[in-house]
Amino acid sequence: MPQVRAEPARTIFCTITTRKAKMPELPEVEITRRGLAAHLPGRTVSAIVVRETRLRQPVPADFAARLTGDTLARIDRRGKYLLLRFAGGTVLAHLGMSGNLRLLPADAPARKHDHIDIVFGEVAMRFSDPRRFGLMLWLAGDGAGHPLLASLGVEPLRDGFTAEWLHRATRGRRCAIKLLLMDSHAVVGVGNIYASESLFRAGIRPRTAARRLTRAKCARLVSAVRQTLTDALAAGGSTLRDFFSAEGQPGYFQQQYFVYDRAGAPCRVCGSPIRSTRMGQRSTYYCPMCQK
């Protein structure tokens, strides 16, 4: 990991209402999963409240009938999707660009963008999503064959994500390595923020053609992705405009960013100004000196 250049002490203020909306990535989804999993498995659904059906995909008409009276066994994650495993099937949830799942008292008043409550006795799991790009669907069985799940790539924090796998996956690929990292058919859950941060830690330019990565660079990048995601999990994720954990806590990993959203600021390692460019219609940040 790069050695951070010393900076004068300063107070860092975290604001969650003025930042542009960014889609929750793997750490934010995993933190939500852990928060829900600490409280809900073993509980039985007592009621369903659907206030808005018009999400990225419409909420199924039989959603309440399918779930009411069923017991939650466990909560899994696949990429950026949460999978609530019930005895009778699976609820697939995605936070979209601005959504969150929170645990609240069942009688807590609903706010403007609170679309769905799954009520477990005195506790409600409430889905809020101002932009309505998220979704909540009912799937038969484990849902593994559903189109949203069937073509997903390797999980970056599991054993299959290795330097050898990445080296094979990049052979013949002309696309930029950053775009490959963000391709959910190749690697799941590594979005714009963590791809930029991982490439900085690995010392690789975002526009480097994937096929040009040597085995040594693949090894550095795999290690950097794993460490970046692990550090983000430890910091509670990044506080995006609307992201909170299931317990309502913001994340603080944005205070550790090396490059993301720091265009023009001095590199924390070498002091050179961080640069920004556009890739795949997304802002990309890098250090021209530390990344080759």
Image (cartoon, helix red, strand yellow):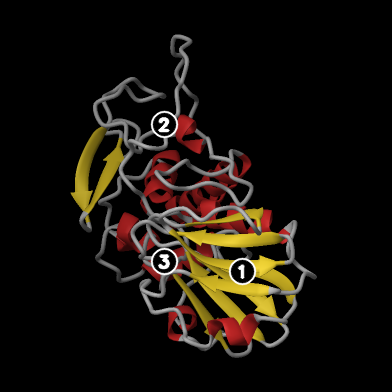
Work out how far the residue at label 1 is from the one at label 3, CA to CA, in angstroms.
16 Å
> Residue 171's x, y, as percent?
36, 69
Residue marked by disc 2:
15
| Vertical arrangement, residue 288 with respect to residue 227, above or below | above
- The residue furthest right is 42
At horizontal 25% and vertical 66% (from top left) the residue drawn is 174
Three-letter code for the amino acid on which mark 1 is drawn: Ile
- The residue furthest top is 8
Sequence order check, earlier mark of 1 and 3 = 1
* Residue 144 position by quadrant: bottom right
Three-letter code for the amino acid on which mark 2 is drawn: Thr
* Residue 176 position by quadrant: bottom left
Three-letter code for the amino acid on which mark 3 is drawn: Gly
> Residue 196's x, y, as percent?
37, 45
Sequence order check, earlier mark of 2 and 1 = 2
> Residue 256's x, y, as percent?
48, 31
